[in-house]
Image (cartoon, helix red, strand yellow):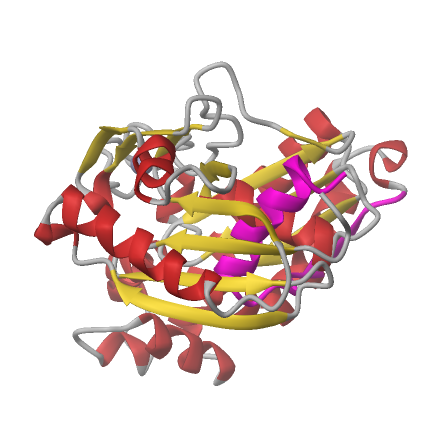
Amino acid sequence: MPHDDLALGVDIGGTKIALALVDRKGEVLAEGRLPTQSSDGQVAVLDRIAQGITELLEQADRPVGGIGIGCPGYIDPHQGIVQQAVNLNWHNVPLRDELAQRLNGKLPIWLHKDADAATLGEFYVGAAQGCPDFINIAIGTGLGMGALVNGQLIVGSGFCGMEIGHISLHPADGRLCNCGQRGCIEMYVSGPGLLAGVEERRSEYPNSPLAMLDPVSTEDVLTAAERQDPLASRVIQDAVEHLTWVVTASIGMLNPARIVLGGGLGLALADTLIPALEAEFKRRTLPITHRNLQIVPSQVQSSAVGAAALVWHYAGK
Ligand SMILES: [Zn+2]
């Protein structure tokens, strides 16, 4: 693919679909946003995505090298199939071929899980440029991770590589996760995790202003943390402790040169999390395993730009 060709990225989320036409520097030339409305049914959503892609392609002022799609859930990137996406209520949807058919097969399409797309976005135009061994951690409504090792995405034998969020560290008595297990890391390091922590620890901090709020939002926890609220601080300390486990295990297994921390909540807490994690991994891992390691905030704001990076990864060499 010629270097100045454009890439079209599509990020399918539970509530909205973001599309962007992006140049090789990551500049967005045109973008679109559609409601997902998965309750309309799979065919309607596929038709809507194809229509959005067609409209964006009409705005391209030069050739487009391909389409990259990021999707939540369990994805088979080789076959282009969404095996399971709970938020979309999709099971075994041949997304790549369905879209190729609607677009008359004019452009190559690559599909990956959204965390992988975000990881490639950081590598090509974000905080991990020039760094072929790094880990991307996105903290938001869930805990998403991706990793590049020697420039290759970790995909896994069943496409579940880097699925660390639902490893349980407290199977007997941890916070109940909606996957059915107790003590999943995601229940300590995510928006729902912080809120579950407030419920769990509310009675321990009767003088905390946050403890007196009901219901509590993630924003409330962040605001309270800025005011040194003891309950908020404790819940964030729980998050640091669990994230430390993720970071140190990743250092031991993959020896990354960089860890990129992003997601809405990850960026909001970056000033707290990054120094805390740096102090902990220096304390808990051997110096030789982290001598090159930096933890940095993510730089790619748009999930559609991350999806476009799939095109650069697979066609752009
Ligand atoms: Zn879980």
The quarter holding residue 317 reads top right
- In the rendered image, the vertical position of residue 158 relative to residue 134, given as above or below: above
Which quadrant of the render holds ligand 1?
top left
Q: Is residue 293 visible?
A: yes
**Residue stretch in magenta:** 292-317
Asked which quadrant contains residue 212, the reply is bottom left
Res 242 seen here: no
Q: Residue at x 35, y 69 (%)?
A: 33
Q: Position of residue 219 (x, y in %)?
A: 36, 77
Say which residue appears at 37% left-offset and 40% top-offset.
104
Q: Which image quadrant is residue 61 in?
A: bottom right
Indicate the position of residue 51 as horizontal and vertical percent values: 30, 58
Q: Is residue 61 left or right of residue 98?
A: right
Name the one closer to the observer, 269 or 306: 306
Residue found at the very far top of the displayed protein: 157
- Which residue is rendered at x = 88% and y = 37% of the image? 287
Where, quadrant-wise, is the N terminus in this rendering? Answer: top right
Residue 168, image x, y percentages: 39, 31
Extreme left residue here?
40
Relative to 229, does residue 111 appear above or below in the rendering? Answer: above
Residue 138 drawn at (x, y percent): 52, 53
- Against 277, is 287 above or below? above
Residue 297 magenta: yes
Q: Is residue 285 left or right of residue 67?
A: right
Front-most of residues 40 and 91: 40
Q: Is residue 194 magenta?
A: no
